[in-house]
Image (cartoon, rainbow, N blue to C red):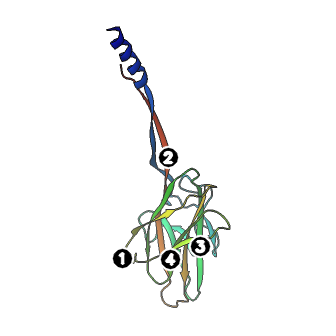
């Protein structure tokens, strides 16, 4: 009897262990902007404002604007100039340090007369990974693309519209509901005791 009790006690001691559940990926909305304020500092989760290139730098004038024309509420609008060819860009930076994966999603529409592109890169000086957006002439459509996390954590996204020289109808496009969702490893520990 004593032997059985001693054995039961020994087994209970051995079974009382700490279990660590393997890392799982928890998706988190990291940065977003739905352009509801007519500002380049709106939204949340960003480490910079929107920055234009090839335009006047203002959210309320120029080719690139935060506008209520052509969208429900407000959105980011491109309206190229008649009789002028050019490429107009706007970019913003966030930090996804520690993420194992990330996804950029947004809605867009365009009239198809120019070339609308979306790009991502790890930081200033790094090459852009770009995708050319097609469709969207009949209304907003959703687009997603993977973002590769960099050791520095810095990630920059960019939208650009390249317009040929047009004399009758200008190239135009709209972008809305920009969101970056990142996945981070999480570890959960639990202790199981058997008696």
Residue 17, image x, y percentages:
44, 27
Q: Nearer the viewer, mark 4 or mark 2?
A: 2
Q: Which residue position is annotated with label 4?
A: 116
The correct choice, above or below, for 152 with respect to 55 in the image is: above
> Circle 4 sits in a helix, a strand or a loop, which is it?
strand
Q: Which residue position is annotated with label 1?
A: 138
Q: Along the horizontal axis of the image, is 80 left or right of 193?
A: right
The alpha-carbon separation of the residues under discs 3 and 4 comes to 10 Å
Disc 4 crowd, CA 10 A, few/some/many (<14, 14-19, 20+)? many
Q: Which residue position is annotated with label 2?
A: 185
The alpha-carbon separation of the residues under discs 4 and 1 comes to 15 Å
- CB within 8 Å, label 4 to label 1: no
The correct choice, above or below, for 97 with respect to 86 in the image is: above
Disc 2 crowd, CA 10 A, few/some/many (<14, 14-19, 20+)? some
The correct choice, above or below, for 180 with respect to 142 in the image is: above
Q: Is residue 178 visible?
A: no
**Mark 4 or 2, nearer chain start:** 4
**Mark 4 or 1, nearer chain start:** 4
- Mark number displayed over residue 86: none
């Amino acid at each position: 009897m004593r032997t059985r009790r001693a054995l039961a006690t020994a087994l209970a001691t051995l079974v009382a262990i700490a279990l660590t559940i393997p890392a799982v990926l928890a998706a988190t909305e990291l940065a977003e902007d739905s352009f509801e304020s007519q500002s380049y500092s709106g939204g949340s989760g960003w480490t910079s404002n929107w920055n234009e290139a090839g335009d006047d730098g203002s959210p309320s004038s120029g080719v690139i604007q935060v506008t209520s024309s052509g969208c429900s509420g407000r959105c980011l609008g491109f309206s190229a100039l008649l009789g002028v060819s050019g490429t107009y860009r706007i970019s913003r930076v966030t930090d996804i340090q520690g993420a194992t994966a990330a996804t950029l999603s947004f809605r867009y529409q365009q009239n198809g007369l120019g070339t609308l592109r979306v790009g991502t890169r790890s930081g200033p000086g790094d090459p852009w990974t770009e995708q050319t957006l097609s469709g969207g002439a009949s209304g907003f459509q959703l687009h997603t693309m993977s973002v590769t996390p960099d050791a520095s954590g810095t990630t920059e996204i960019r939208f650009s519209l390249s317009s040929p020289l047009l004399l009758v109808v200008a190239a135009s496009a709209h972008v809305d509901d920009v969101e970056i969702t990142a996945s981070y490893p999480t570890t959960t520990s639990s202790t199981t005791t058997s008696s």
